[in-house]
Amino acid sequence: MRIELERRARASTAFAAISPLLALVLTLFFGGLMFWLMGKDPVATLYTFFIEPLFDVWSLHELVIKAAPLILIAVGLAICFRSNNWNIGAEGQFTMGAITGSILPVLMPEWHSAALLPAMLIMGMLGGALYAGIPALLKTRFNTNEILTSLMLVYIAQLFLDWLVRGPWRDPQGYNFPKTISFAPEAILPELLDSGRAHWAAVFAIVAAIALWFMMRFMLKGFEVSVLGQAERAGRFAGFSSKKMVWFALMLSGALAGLAGISEVSGSIGHLQPSISPGYGFTAIIVAFLGRLNPIGIIASGLVLALTYLGGEAAQLSIGISDKISRVFQGLLLFFVLSCDTLILYRIRLVFSGSKTEAGA
C-alpha cells in the first residue's frame, strides 16, 4: 500500500480564498496546545504573544520596523517564485546589501552630505542584486539548482560580515567589541514620526509592494513572469526568454533584499555588527506564501509575521518562555499554509499493491 496525491479536477475557490486564514487558526490552536503542554495558560500566553503588543505606541513602531524588511524581501521573492525561480538565499542578499551600503559611512566617515544616504541605499541595492546574480549565472550557464547555490551563499555572506566587523572594519574606539564605527547622522534613515523609532524603510516596503503589484497586474513584464512560471514552453513560444527571466527575477529579488539590509543597518542599528538580522530572509519566504504571492497580500502577512518576533520578545520577558518560540510559530504557520494549499488542490488516495489501477498501468 502507498499514498498518492491526485490533483482535483476542480479545486474549491472558497477554500482557496480562506486557506491563509485557516492556516493561521490552526497555528494558533496548536500554539496554544504547545503552551498548555509547557504548563502555561494558553489563552493568557497567546494574548501576550499576539494582542498585548498592539496596545502600546512603542510596540506599534517596533512592529513596523520588523515588518518593513519582511515585506521588502517577500515581494521580491514572490516575483521569483511566480516565475519558477526559487531564491532561498535572500538572507545572504540582505547581508551583502548591508555590507556594500555601509562602505561609504565606514570607510569615508568624514563625508557629511545630503547625497550620502541615497548613495548608501543605491549601493545596498546593487550589492544585493549582484550577490543574487551569482546563482542566476550558475543556473543559466551551468544549469545548477538555484535553491542550493542561493542557500549556501547565505553562510558565505554571514561569515564575511563577521570577518569584517572583527577585523578590518572594527571600530578602534569600540573597546574591542566586534562592530564598526557608528554611522554619521547623515547616514541614518530619518524617523517617520516623533512618537517612536519607525523609519522610512516602511515607506520603501509599501512603495515596492504597490509597484510590483501594478507590474504583475497591468504590465507585459508581469504577464511574462506568470506565463514562464506556469508554462515555460508556452512562454518560449510567445517569444519570452526563460534565461532573461532568471536574471530579472533573481536580481530584482536581491536588490530589494539588499535595500532591506542597508535600511535595517542605517535605520535601526546605526552600525555593522556580526548579527544584523533575526532571520528576516528566511521568514520572508513564509510571508510570501501566506500573502498568496500577491504583493498587496504580502503587506498584511508581513505584519502578522513581524508580530511573532515582537510577541516572542514580550512573552520572553513577561512569561519566561524561550525567544525561540517565535521560530516555532513561524514554522507552524508555513507548515499549515503549505498543507492547506496541498489538500485544497489534491486529494489523498490509498493505492494497494495488486489493485486494478496498478494492473492497468
Image (cartoon, helix red, strand yellow):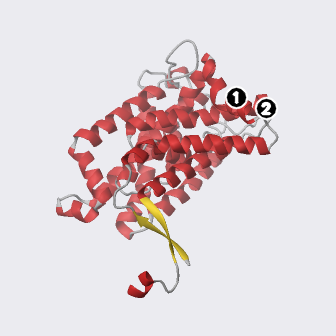
Classify 10 Å Cα crowding around label 2: few (below 14), some (14-19), many (20 and above): some
Q: Amino acid at mark 2?
A: Ile
- Judge whether 250 appears above or below 268 on screen: below
Which residue is rendered at x = 48% and y = 29% of the image? 201
> For the residue marked with disc 1, what is the amino acid?
Thr
Between residue 34 and residue 288, name the one nearer to us.
34
Which residue is found at the position 64% from the left and 42% from the top?
29
Q: Quadrant of residue 216?
A: top left
Question: Which of the 4 quarters of the picture holds residue 166?
Answer: top right
Question: What mark, if any, has residue 137 been given in the picture?
Answer: none
Asked if disc 2 and disc 1 are in contact, CB closer than 8 Å, the reply is yes
Query: Are there few (<14), some (14-19), or many (20+) residues within 10 Å of tag 1?
Result: many
Image side of residue 48 versus residue 351, left or right = right
Residue under circle 1? Answer: 48
Tally of marks: 2
Residue at 62% across / 36% down in the picture? Answer: 308
In the rendering, at what x and y percent does residue 101 appear?
49, 37
Instruction: Identify the element where label 1 is drawn.
Output: helix
